[in-house]
Image: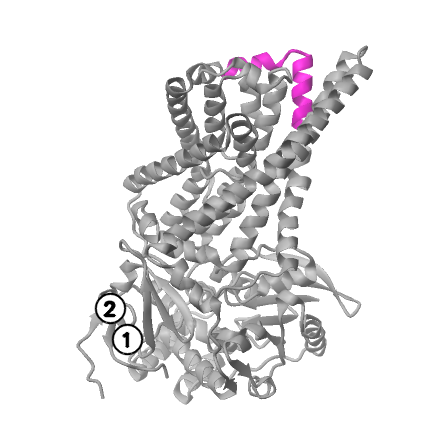
Amino acid sequence: MIKPEKPKVLLEVESGTTVRILKFMTGNELEGKLRQLGILPGNCAKVIRHAPLGGPFLIELNGREIALGQAIASKIEVEVVSCVSP
Amino acid sequence: MRFALIGQPNCGKSTLFNQVAGYKAETGNFSGTSVTFTASKVRVMGQVVELVDLPGTYTLAGTNPAEREVFDYLASHSVDAIINVVDASHLAQGLELTLELLELERPTVVALNMIDEARRLGIVIDGAHLQERLDAPVLPMIASRGRGVKEVFTTTLRVAQQQKNARRIPFGTEVDETVVHLAGQLDGEADPLPATTAAIKLIEGDRKLEGQLKIIRPELTSQIEQARNFLRSRHGQDPVWVFGGERHARASEIAQAYILQGEHRLTWRDRLDDVLLHPVLGYVALISILFLFFQFVYRFGSLLEVPLINFFDHLNAQMQGQLANSAFLAYVLTGVIQGISGGVAIVLPYLTPFLLGLGLLEDIGYLPRVAFLMDALMHRLGLHGKAIVPFILGYGCNVPAIMSTRILEEKRDRYVAAALSTLVPCAARLAVVFGLVAFYLGPNMALLIYLLNLFVIALTARVLTRVLPEASPGLILEMPVYRMPTFRTLSSKTWFRIREFIVEAWPVLIAGSVVLALLNYFDISKYFNYLLTPLSWVLGLPNQVGVPLIFGILRKELSLIMLHQALGGVELKDVLTSTQMMTFSVFVVFYIPCLATLLVIRKELGNKAMAAIAGMTVVIATMAAFLARILGSIFFK
């Protein structure tokens, strides 16, 4: 069993890492938008790659790929943990 | 009878619509291509049905204008049946919207689209049992190939005729009781919405609906508050998220129960992003793709332009010979011929390959990749990656580009993106740049204009960002899987856009060309030219460019076609210097977007925005053209 690390924001996560989404530090409107895409607390996501020079993160979640800008990635709290979405 | 097509972004709704209605809606492999409602009459088993294509939406909750419009439409109009298109390869996600639609309690049919794509990913769906669970017809479909489409429509007609309303699937006990309780209090006041849907909306905090009901039933406010408080205490969550969460859980559970997971066969498509989104190779690929695209357009176009122009010149010369004794008729005829040849020889040769190429990139799904790669750069312009979509569409036509700014969440972003995308040289301006600069001065000079254009856009963006500071949250964009475009979709899409030119723009071109001929014949054009003398003086252009520039506001191609005429129908390189050609083209590229674009800006952003953008473009055009004049006088010796 891998012990979960302490919470980070998505922005600090390296490519190829799986994380569990904990909570959002965004406004309600933005949170709604993320939730629609299946980015919900408790779900698992994998950071696939990120674009250079402060570009967006590409994460995989429930079999679909979603690009998130850095400003947003810095507002999603996650824990690095090997996990599979429920 | 009226059917509404609804589904999540990029699920293939518009593709389905186009299959049955002929090509009327814009499609492309990225979210939010359809931002307006498109309606069409179609025949289903001999019956005429109005089919309405609604913009893609993840939910009816409505966080951006496009989503809000869908809910308002379903709430206000009487739709006889709903066709819910679901991307079979993302069943759980799609079902969240399906559950929300079932709550509307209207006749509903679920079309599982792209089952071929799903199968490739190893997903096989047990449709029969899913249908039983949802208590609504579920049918497989591959819209891009027209498979299963007929069955979807005949089934929809049947449920519509039988008025077989869908039934909502209950939430978890506590939540459901709260909804049902509040719904009971509404007493049908929320018509045409079912009471339960209205109750959900009210608990979620729909101010519009609450405002309407408060007038008739003031006491409802406290009941709504009570329900909200109850849910907040039980779920420890803002009530706004409760229903979404419930639907998400239910949808995942249903999807899991009816998906028979097979084997995911990795193909080249899954590996493609390793190259196309690579931090270095990705940009090499991007530049190469755009370069090839540019070359393709240029080579294809110039191959046709020369012989076609020669043909029309020859034709005109012959006609002139025949009409030697009637100067008036000769003038008018020249106008007509130049209007026609402008369309056939100058515009279509470049427009056709351009639209084919753009359509191909759209359907494959490359555009969202461009957004991903360009996000960092776009941030420097004070926007985010998604704003690249209006820019790219702008190269085709500014009108859809302005419309697509609706996919941006912030009003400020929409404003900036609209202002900037009017500076993007559309296909009409492409015709001017290619027909004048590339034709006489070579393709590299045309490329130079495009680079100057990018530079000016970036500079304008910096200035606008100063005036309107950035507040946008940043990029959130779904990356679709690559899809193999079908010949049928691509060709009908290209034809749809070319037809728009032929039907809407070409007659204006011919009429404008005739009007100019008349102005010349009666010697009136000089008054118009006087009006613009200050401008032509500053830019070092012949006085006669006044009329072509004024008419260019109607259609940008007109400015080139009328230029030919205004200068006496002679070989342009004999009367214009290289510098003048550059200066003229640069001015045409930037000044006032065409009338259609202005009108769509007014519709989307209001009168003030339209005036501001038009004014801005004239200032920019004059400065950029002046710069071109200076540079030209240094380099063209």
Asked which quadrant contains residue B409, the reply is: bottom left
Please, what is the three-letter code of the amino acid marked with disc 1? Val
Q: At numbered mark 2, what does the secondary structure look like: helix, strand or loop?
A: loop
SS at badge 1: strand
Residue B563 coordinates in the image, percent (x, y) = 58, 22
| Dot 2 crowding, Cα within 10 Å, few <14, some 14–19, many 20+ | some
Q: Residue at x 57, y 13 (%)?
A: B527
Q: CA distance from mark 1 to mark 2?
A: 8 Å
Q: Which mark is residue A43?
A: none
B516 magenta-colored? yes
Marks 1,2: beta carbons within 8 A:
yes
Lateral position of residue B17 relative to residue B271, left or right: right
For marks 1 and 2, the one nearer the N-term is 2
Looking at the image, residue B427 sits to the left or right of residue B583; the answer is right
Main secondary-structure element of the magenta-colored stretch = helix
Residue B574 vertical position relative to residue B404 in the rendered view, above or below: above
Label 1 chain ID: A
**Residue B334 in picture, x, y percent from top left:** 72, 21
Is B24 located above or below residue B292 in the figure?
below
Q: Which residues are magenta?
A: B512-532
What residue is disc 1 on? A19
Q: Answer with left or right where residue A50 lies relative to residue B523.
A: left
Identify the residue under disc 2. A13
Is residue B543 visible in the rendered image? The answer is yes
Name which residue type carries label 2.
Val
- State the residue in front, B167 or B380: B380
Q: Chain of mark 2?
A: A
Q: Residue at x 68, y 31 (%)?
A: B308
Q: Quadrant of residue B612?
A: top left
